[in-house]
Image: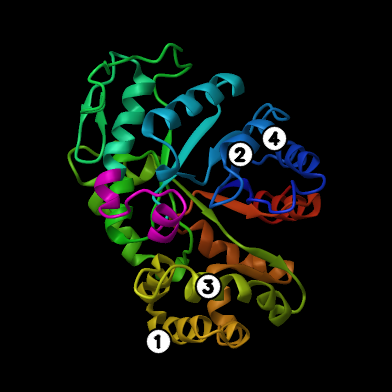
Amino acid sequence: MKLGLLVEPFRLGPPEGIIATIQEAERLGFDSLWTSEAYGTDALTPLAWWGAHTTKLRLGTAIVQMSARTPVATAMAAITLDHLSGGRVILGLGASGPQVVEGWYGQPFPRPLARTREYVEIVRMVVRREKPVEYAGEHYTLPYAGGSGLGKPLRATVHPLRPEIPIYLAAEGPKNVALAAEIADGWLPFFYSPRHDGVYREALAEGFARPSARHTLEDFDIVLPVPVVVDDDVERAAEQLRPMLALYMGGMGARGQNFHFNVFARMGFEDLALKVQDLYLGGRKEAAMAAIPTSLVEQVALIGPKEKIRDELAAWRSSLVTTMLVRGNSIEAVRTAAELVLGG
């Protein structure tokens, strides 16, 4: 299992000492550095800035939101950063949800799978640079149909460093996971439990079985952020993660349109997820957090004393996950992860 470092969006400015933390992760043998975006800081700018202070770490977006940029704009950014980093870019893409897509970006959300398929196809056409880009899809058309009538097919002026830049897809629902297995080079799940991964194995197998599939499970990267809290008191460690779990399970998205809620329902926790959602949306956030049992936290995270975490890592090593992302901005966090996962 490989290790990556995920530096999440910041609100009040970059985390203090983050460049030293990233460089320590590289020294300790981490494989990759990842950044993300929601509706604040973007993913590409921090990745370029921090990546410039590294030489070996692969640089991934987890994720770039597709509704934020046209496919061509995303391809241009990926080609540019790939040149600047010496071919280290992984382009992680995701559809986000209707609240962000329509509320923040002013773009339509319906039919995200079909939109994703077209988006990826166009990005790859730009990167391959075989000919001027022409595309006639349901969601994207190049050149633009209408307007002045002067648009013409164009080819990128810059020659890409590589004929292909790896594309990973964020996906939670079975249909989206199958799409990732079919058209992408890797998958970015968000919540995952080794004990309840049967639905994901089925969805991945469906995607890999399609005629257009690019990979098999053996050469497909599955990159997961796994919360790790080292604390001799397991309950105290679980308490640190309950706010995040309650937010995503109960408060992220609208009732009936919360993809994170659906993940926990598919794991077999639908009744609990409904209770947490009812409490959270009813304004009782503290009660929603308290409703999440430690046993659930232990299924989607690694918490407790180091010895307990080492023992539980066996299940993660035998799971689908190939790269574990560490959430953390401190040198202590990356050193602890390297010690536990890499034996460093």
SS under mark 2:
loop
Circle nearer the viewer, 1 or 2: 1
Q: Sequence order check: which comes first, mark 4 or mark 2?
A: 2
State the image quarter where residue 72 is shown. top left
Q: Earlier in the sequence, mark 1 or mark 2?
A: 2
Horizontal and vertical percent position of residue 256: 34, 74
Q: Secondary structure at mark 1?
A: helix
Label 2 crowding class (10 Å Cα cut-off): few <14, some 14-19, many 20+? some
What kind of residue is marked 4?
A: Trp
Going by the numbered disc 1, the residue's amino acid type is: Asp
Q: Taking 257 as reference, is 142 above or below it?
A: above
The amino acid type found where label 3 is placed reads Gln
Q: Nearer the viewer, residue 224 or 133?
A: 133
Q: CA separation, marks 2 and 3?
A: 25 Å
User: Depth-wise, is mark 3 or mark 4 nearer the camera?
Assistant: 4
Of the numbered discs 2 and 3, the one sitting upstream in the chain is 2
Query: What residue would you read off at disc 2?
Result: 31
The magenta segment is 97-115
Label 1 with label 2: CB-CB less than 8 Å: no
Residue at 59%, 82% (x, y): give it: 285
Specify the label residue 271 is tagged with.
1
Whole-number angstrom distance, CA of label 3 to CA of label 4: 32 Å
- Left or right of 139, for residue 265: right
Q: Of callouts 3 and 4, which one flags the residue occurring earlier in the amino acid sequence?
A: 4
Q: How far is mark 3 from mark 1, CA to CA?
A: 17 Å
Q: Is residue 99 magenta?
A: yes
- The residue where tag 3 is placed is 299
Q: What crowding class fits label 4: few (fewer than 14 Cα within 10 Å), some (14-19), or many (20 or more)? A: some
Residue linked to disc 4: 50
Q: Kindly check if marks 2 and 3 are in contact, taking CB atoms under 8 A apart as contact.
A: no
Query: Which amino acid lies under the numbered mark 2 shown in the image of this protein?
Result: Asp
Q: In the rendered image of this protein, does residue 282 appear above or below residue 267?
A: below
